[in-house]
Amino acid sequence: MNDIPILMAAPMPATVIDALDRHFTLHRLWEQPDADAFLARHGAAIRGIAANALAGRIDAGLFDRLPALEIVANFGVGYDNIDARAAAERGVMVTNTPGVLDAEVADLTLGLLLATIRRLPQADRYVRDGRWPDAPFPLSPTLRGRTVGIIGLGAIGKQIARRLEAFDVAIAYHGRTRQRDVDYAYYDTPVALAGACDVLIAIVPGSASTQHLVGAAVLDALGRDGIFVNVARGSVVDEPALIAALQSGTILAAGLDVYADEPNVPEALRALDNVVLLPHLGSASEHTRAAMGQLVVDNLTSWFSQRRVVTPVPETA
Ligand code: A2R
């Protein structure tokens, strides 16, 4: 396989780069002084792409420039950075990294939820600023007695729910379909779910169908004591509506790991005291990123040695 040209558009962990260097002829697009000129010159030979969210959108425009392309192996379970339907139409396989990150993202979600409710980053700043000797830190809201609603009870959503069970809270969910393997309360719209709970966690894929699934009406329904946690995609929430709801007290607080225009976080969000803001950390541990990287490598080597992949996305399965 060593002569097969693979394109990496944006840097990935060193272990992935090393492995792909060993198996293939790896082209690092970000190191090219002129990416367009590189694609014009070498695009016709490229047979695989190792992709991640930093690589920009991978769609028909790029596929047109890579006529020999057979596979796009994405580093991440969400693949809203790739037009998988356009890939399927051209017979290009797309893979992602499901499963290996579920527990990590679920752990992070519980951490973010507790940090938001108990105001842990604010308390940390309080100690660092030397304010403790003046007065105790103000009492916080609580997770006790809450009902937690999960929008998107898929692989990660179910891991979040399992962890929440240990916290003795009521659990409810919304998705397009009722899940047969759980007995949590089901609501057939996001507004109905938000009306029935006082914590709302979004963990759906980014897609046209989930665009602004959480908007002003959902936040209104969540209510004045409501906590919103987004570990899905920034596109899932109407960000200006969320900012307005946080400013006006329509909801109590939010814990956010994802944003509409990463890595840019609106100044209006950063100015608020009732938000906890993380820089898209969901799967970002060394352990889990290594497992995701291995799956990217396995998908590519398996495709070029056996015409089979480990984890195809549904559109190209
Ligand atoms: O709607 P269903 O029954 O297909 O349930 C899926 C739900 N979902 C939606 N819920 C409401 N409205 C929609 N338009 C919609 N589209 C999808 O999201 C399912 O319960 C869940 C996705 O589950 P999985 O496919 O197992 O994805 P996983 O691995 O849990 O990851 C979720 C997302 C990633 O795509 C990244 O964006 C993020 O979490 O890290």
Image: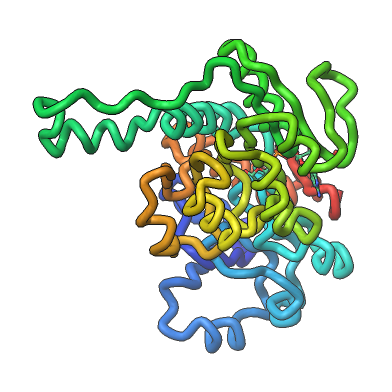
Q: Nearer the viewer, residue 265 or 122?
A: 122
Q: Position of residue 176 (x, y in %)?
A: 87, 41
Instruction: State whether residue 37 is above or below residue 170.
Output: below
Q: Residue at x 21, y 35 (%)?
A: 126
Image quarter of residue 15 = top left
61 left or right of 243 in image: right
Q: How is the image coloured?
A: rainbow
- The quadrant of the rendered image in which ligand 1 is seen is top right
Q: Nearer the viewer, residue 43 or 235?
A: 235
Q: Nearer the viewer, residue 307 or 60?
A: 60
Image quarter of residue 58 = bottom right
Q: Residue at x 62, y 16 (%)?
A: 169
157 left or right of 290 in image: right
Instruction: State whether residue 79 is above or below residue 184.
Output: below
Q: Position of residue 124 (x, y in %)?
A: 25, 33
Image quarter hosting the N terminus: bottom right
Q: Residue at x 71, y 37 (%)?
A: 194
Q: Position of residue 143 (x, y in %)?
A: 52, 21
Count of numbered circles on the image: 0
Q: Is residue 304 visible?
A: no
Q: Position of residue 118 (x, y in %)?
A: 40, 27
Q: Is residue 32 visible?
A: yes
